[in-house]
Image (cartoon, grey):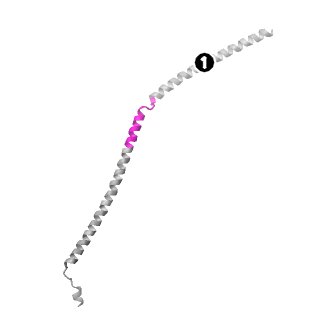
């Protein structure tokens, strides 16, 4: 009797439909999982593309601003102009010192003549 119970019974139609249903359900579950994973990947790619577009716009704006920025040549011209101004101020200081010395000499002479 035990041997008869252990013997393989021929499959009936309900068993076959249950197996097909389980395989179908499993396949649909895998398909849904893969689709959701693809959706998340597509969302990430979309966000990355938006970020790249934003960075491109910022880079274009910065490139436009760099064109009008001060360069090495401009700084060298500014340095040369400052050197000329420094020379002029130095000459003015020398002239002022000479005038100051002359004025002191005149005041000294006036003081000497006024006292004598």
Q: In this view, does 108 lie above or below 5?
A: above
In which quadrant of the rendered image does the C terminus lie?
top right
**Element marked by disc 1:** helix
For the residue pair 101 and 16, the one nearer the viewer reads as 16
Is-magenta flag for residue 58? yes
**Name of the residue lying farthest toward the right:** 116
Q: In this view, does 35 lie above or below 62?
A: below
**Left or right position of 73 against 106:** left
Going 50% across and 24% down the picture, which residue do you hit?
Answer: 80
Going 30% across and 63% down the picture, which residue do you hit?
Answer: 32
**Left or right position of 106 against 17:** right
**Residue 107 image position (x, y, % from top left):** 73, 13
Q: How many labels does the image show?
A: 1
**Residue 44 image position (x, y, % from top left):** 36, 53
Going 59% across and 18% down the picture, which residue do you hit?
Answer: 91
Q: What stretch is highlighted in magenta?
A: 55-72
Q: For residue 24, what is the image quadrant?
A: bottom left
**Residue 79 image position (x, y, % from top left):** 51, 26
In which quadrant of the rendered image does the N terminus lie?
bottom left
Look at mark 1 in the image and give the residue it sits on. Answer: 92
Secondary structure mostly taken by the magenta-highlighted segment of the chain: helix
Is-magenta flag for residue 108? no
For the residue pair 31 and 67, the one nearer the viewer reads as 31
Going 34% across and 51% down the picture, which residue do you hit?
Answer: 46
**Residue 95 image position (x, y, % from top left):** 62, 16
Q: In this view, does 31 lie above or below 81?
A: below
């Amino acid at each position: 009797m035990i041997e008869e119970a252990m013997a393989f019974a021929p499959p009936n139609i309900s068993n076959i439909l249950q197996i097909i249903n389980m395989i179908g359900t499993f396949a649909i579950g895998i398909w849904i999982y893969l689709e959701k994973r693809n959706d998340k990947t597509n969302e990430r790619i979309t966000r990355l593309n938006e970020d790249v577009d934003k960075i491109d716009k910022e880079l274009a704006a910065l490139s436009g601003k760099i064109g009008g920025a001060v360069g090495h040549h401009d700084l060298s011209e500014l340095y040369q102009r400052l050197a000329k101004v420094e020379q002029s101020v130095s000459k003015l200081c020398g002239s002022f010192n000479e005038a100051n010395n002359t004025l002191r000499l005149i005041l000294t002479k006036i003081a000497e003549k006024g006292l004598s």
